[in-house]
Image: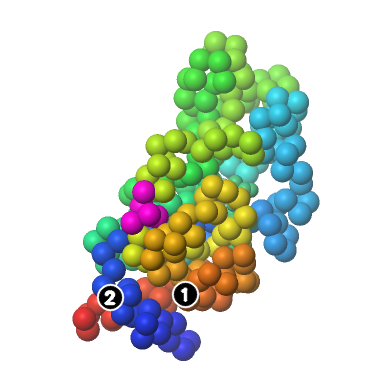
Amino acid sequence: MDLLISDVTKQRLGQAKRVVVLTGAGISAASGIPTFRGENGLWTKLAPQELASFEGFYRNTAVVSEWYKHRRDIIEVCQPNAAHTTLVELEKLVAEFTLITQNIDGLHQRAGSQDVIELHGTIMQNYCTRCNRQYSVAEFAQIYNRSSNHVPRCFCGGIVRPNVVWFGESLPVAAYERAYKASMQAEVFLAIGTSAQVRPAADLPMIAKEQGAYLIEINIVKTVLTPHADLFLEGAADKILPQFNREYQSLLANV
Ligand code: APR
């Protein structure tokens, strides 16, 4: 594979103390988890408003609960891929590294990333819409399997939902504030495997860019972000990132 990073990139990366990474569904594609848009994306076959909104959940609790349980069952047998594990290595090379994800699959944590800002929540947690009692995957499975019509109910009688951000819902304030602040101070910003279409997460790369960050995009196709990227690395994240990391390591070794 040819060298990925140019002399300009080397200069910017070599000097960077604050690196921010934003990941989307594309980083988990190699692990076997479907993306949402693009070829074979979930939203090309299913209606997001029906399955990923509170209205859809309220209208059809059993269907939405089953869908999230199905996705959780898939995720639980998937493994982090080389892109996830490379970000754990990349973090060791950087003075201030911030990992922001739109993904709810928990693969960054399972790969070893210690501090992941989950802008859209996590499918691994559920909570009661009435008393806010938290349910782990195992605890949720108990009440789900006990429910007569696949409507998971809390011990208080309230309905239990996944701890994910649905369309029309606000992002967790503390998570977004951390992500926004890191993006404002980023010297290098990597956008990896995201179509950059869902705000406010999609705004973060441009917020960083407008503050002077060097913007690198890794994707298998061009996106709305590509024209603004200082470096567009076209390819699968689990192939590009290990090579990128090797070049970054040798760059730092020669600085
Ligand atoms: N390597 C890199 N990029 C990839 C790969 C891969 N192996 N496979 C797919 N991609 C790219 C696609 O080209 C696409 O641009 O990943 C991107 C995935 O885009 P989306 O499916 O739109 O996912 P994402 O950007 O994370 O969506 C944001 O939308 O539905 C909501 O809450 C959901 O968090 C999600 C948000």
> Is the residue 6 above or below the residue 27 in the image?
below
- Look at mark 2 in the image and give the residue it sits on: 14
Secondary structure under the numbered disc 2 in the rendered image: helix
Front one among 172 and 50: 172
- Indicate the quadrant of ligand 1 in the picture: bottom right
Q: Position of residue 131 (x, y in %)?
A: 51, 15
- First-in-chain label (1 vs 2): 2
- Residue drawn at (41%, 81%) of the image: 5
Quadrant where the C terminus sits is bottom left
Q: Is residue 80 visible?
A: no
Residue type at mark 1 is: Asp
Residue type at mark 2 is: Gly
Q: Based on the displayed image, in which of its 4 quarters is residue 3 positioned?
A: bottom left
Q: Which residue range is magenta in the image?
A: 181-185
Q: Residues within 10 Å of mark 1 (few under 14, many from 20)?
A: some
- Look at mark 1 in the image and give the residue it sits on: 230
Q: Based on the displayed image, in which of its 4 quarters is residue 154 positioned?
A: top right
- Residue at far bottom of view: 2
- Residue drawn at (47%, 36%) of the image: 172
Give the overall secondary structure of the magenta segment.
helix
Mark 1 and mark 2: Cα distance apart in space: 15 Å
151 to the left or right of 190: right
Q: Position of residue 50 (x, y in %)?
A: 75, 37
